[in-house]
Each structure stands twice: as structure tokens, then as C-alpha cells.
Amino acid sequence: MRNIYKICILATLLLFVACSADSADSGGQSSIQVGLMPDITSVPFIIAEQQGFLPENVTLEVFRAAADRDAALHSGLLDVVVSDMIALHLNNQGGFEGFAIMETFSSFGLVAHPSSGVTSVAELHGADIGLSLNTIIEYMVDRFLTMYGINPSDVEKVSVPQIPQRFELLEAGHITAAAMPEPFPSAAVAAGLIRLADSYQEGIRPGVLIAMADAHANKTAELLDLLDAYNRAVEFINATDSAEFMPSIVEIMGLPDAAYDFVVPTMEFAQNPSADEFYLVQNWMLNNGLLETPFDFDDLVRPLR
């Protein structure tokens, strides 16, 4: 494999500096550093690497938690991140200018431990739910709860930023329920836990690929090549049995063993983010005090095609 994948934490960012300097390769293209998360959203990028679709100037880094990814982003170590509309707003509000260039294939699930007796979202009143606060995960939890008539203030939100740790706490029965990106929910169900809600099934699509402003302005050709590689990987994924590539995905991302049997759903080619979803996310942030001033859709969403 051309690149060495690492599960990065904040303490290892100095190691990342050495491998992420912005340089040109022998073909004259500027380097592109891409930050990934251990979820289904990142699978096409890793497949693109494995199948040789990814340009030689692109480096992929897998992070265990969104905070670690954003720390690298804010340190100027990343050009592109697999992210979401919450982070898009927060980064721009904080002065880290970036634009959503495509919608990613994101899927989030809410899962309960069977010992809790909870079998539906409607039964979560007063329950403790593992999540990461002020992130897309908390947004998804609130969306699920309100859909089933529960006020989000009527549950106990337990902050567990790292996704694998959240999975382990739920699997051990230390928390009633947890919200996680795929394939963690499916892995939990395979281990005997109970799926309560699924964002993919509900048509909730807040995932985006963010290009930082400098890359958006000065590396357009490289970013277009990245999107082309993404589409080729999606075509491969849709035509291939998941069992052929999930074992290596599990190893690279540090996923639970149950994810070996995860069947990747039919993925869509790169498409533009939804304005409706953008404003739903923004209203949630305004209502929860996470956003000081609203943005227009065109302020933050700038597709390359």
C-alpha cells in the first residue's frame, strides 16, 4: 500500500507535520492532505487508494475523534476533511475558512443495549445516551428524539468523544444507548444490540467534504481529480461484494471485529450538498447557542462543478 495509514490522536500531530508538508510531486501537482474519520463516509477514499484510483499527490490520514481531526485542520496540516455541516459552520465561525464541495455518503445510527429494555426511540425518556457533544452526532440524536416526541433535554447526554470507546461502553452495557456513524451501529447490531434509528433510512444527509479556502482557490485541478477518484471508488464499491474489501477497511480504520461482515449499501456518486439540510443544521446550532451569526448557503457551499 502506497500510504501508511495511522489512527491519529492529538499527541501525534507533530509526527503528522513531517508527512504533510505542502509540496509538488514529480507530475507538478500540489499535494493534498485528506483527513478521514473511521466511518462509512471514508470508505470510498480508502478504496480509491487501494485500487490505484487516488492520485499520487494525495495522502490520507484516519483520525479516531473529530476533535483530533479538527486540531490537525486548525494547525494547517489538512487541505480536505471528511466532515459535516456542523463542523463546516463552526470552522468558519472560528476563522478557519473552508467550503463544502460535495455531499458525502454519511449514515448515523442510534443503538441500545438489550439489558436496558429499550426497543424504540420513544422509550428513551430519561435514558443516558453516549455521544459527542456539539457535533453532528448530538444533532442526529436530537433529530431522532424530536421525531419520536421526546424533548432532547429529557435525556442524559454522556460525552464520549472517541467513537471506538463509545462503542465499547455501549457493548459492555455501561450506557443505555449510543449514537455512532456506520459501520459501528451495524457492528453493534451484529453483536446483539438493538438499532433504534438510522439517518440513512430517514433521508438525513448532513455529511460534506470540506476543502479549506487555500486549497479551494489554488488546488482546483487536484481537488477535481480527488472527486473523480471518489466516483471511481463508488463504482467499484457498488459492483463488488463488501466481503472482498471490508477486512482491510476494518484494519485501517480500527473498527470492531463485527464490522468484518458489514455490507456497504449502494453508494451515490459525488453530488452537491442540500440547502434544506444546511438550514436545518444551522437552525439547530442557533437554537443551541453554537452559532453566533447565520450564514447563507452560498457562503459555505461552493461545489467545484
Image: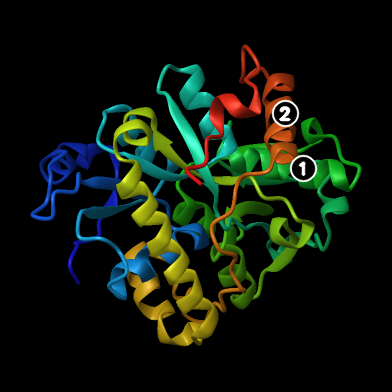
Q: Which residue is mark 1?
A: 143
Q: Is residue 77 left or right of residue 45?
A: left
**Is residue 78 positioned above or below 116 on the image?**
above
Which residue is drawn at the image coordinates 44% and 59% (left, top)?
42
Label 2: state its secondary structure: helix
Q: Label 2 crowding class (10 Å Cα cut-off): few <14, some 14-19, many 20+?
A: some
Horizontal side of 116 relative to 237 (left or right) equals right
How far across and down, in percent of the image, does residue 33 sit? 27, 46
Q: Residue at x 19, y 48 (%)?
A: 29
Residue 258 in view of the camera = no
Q: Residues within 10 Å of mark 1 (few under 14, many from 20)?
A: some
Q: Secondary structure at mark 1?
A: helix
Q: Amino acid at mark 2?
A: Trp
Do the residues under discs 2 and 1 have CB atoms within 8 angstroms? yes
Q: Amino acid at mark 1?
A: Arg
The image quarter in which residue 301 lies: top right
Pointer 2 or 1: first along the chain: 1
Report x, y in % for residue 195: 72, 65
Q: Residue at x 45, y 17 (%)?
A: 94
The residue at the point 23 percent across, 38 percent down is 11
User: What is the CA distance from the residue labelled 2 to the residue labelled 1?
Assistant: 9 Å
63 sits to left or right of 231: left
The residue that mark 2 highlights is: 284
Q: Residue 77 lies in what quarter of the image?
A: top left
